[in-house]
Amino acid sequence: MAHRSLTDLVAELRRCVRSPRRAARTSDPAALLVRLLGACRALAVEDRPGGLVVRLAAEADSTMLLSCVLHRALPAPLTAVEAAVAEHLCEGRTLAQIAEQRGVSVNTIKSQVRQLFRKLGVDSRVALVRRLGSLV
């Protein structure tokens, strides 16, 4: 991919960010990003508290450099019920024990755990404990 077309891709991505509603009718930001990244090679990746910083260079022309910051998404705030269920899970209680203590069905607790996992971006109790530990 030529230097000029990379510049065009970056400009189109900027337009998508500035006015997403208008850009959605004309361009697919994900497809633009895939094309842009496919034409680049990573020079450096730094893990910073705010996210990953990636420095890219065009494959065809090393003079065109691009820096991207991939921000870590903050989790959605937990409801009081979700926080209570999370606390029970972190204490090692079973779903049945949590349901009995809270006076609801096991299926309700399962649903709340699914929602909790989705909000925190985890897929296991161990990951939940680690995630909650990093938020405190």
Image (cartoon, rainbow, N blue to C red):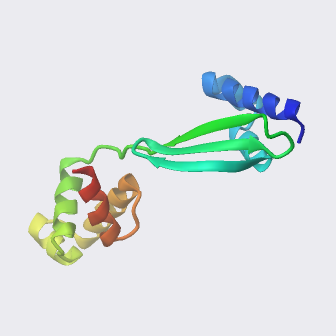
Q: Nearer the viewer, residue 9 or 78?
A: 9
In percent of width and height, residue 80 lies at: 18, 49
Above/below status of 67 relative to 72: above
Above/below status of 11 relative to 60: above
In percent of width and height, residue 68 lies at: 60, 39
Q: Nearer the viewer, residue 122 or 70?
A: 70
Q: Residue at x 20, y 68 (%)?
A: 90
Q: Is residue 4 left or right of residue 103?
A: right
In percent of width and height, residue 88 lies at: 16, 66
Q: Residue furthest front?
A: 63
Above/below status of 61 relative to 93: above
Q: How many marks?
A: 0
In percent of width and height, residue 129 lies at: 26, 65
Q: Nearer the viewer, residue 15 or 115?
A: 15
Q: Is residue 8 left or right of residue 98?
A: right
Q: Please identify the quadrant where the N terminus is shown.
A: top right
Q: Nearer the viewer, residue 97 or 68?
A: 68
Residue 50: quarter of image: top left
Q: Residue furthest right?
A: 2
Q: Is residue 75 left or right of residue 35?
A: left
Q: Residue at x 23, y 47 (%)?
A: 79
Residue 57: quarter of image: top right
Q: Residue at x 35, y 57 (%)?
A: 115
Q: Residue at x 26, y 57 (%)?
A: 132
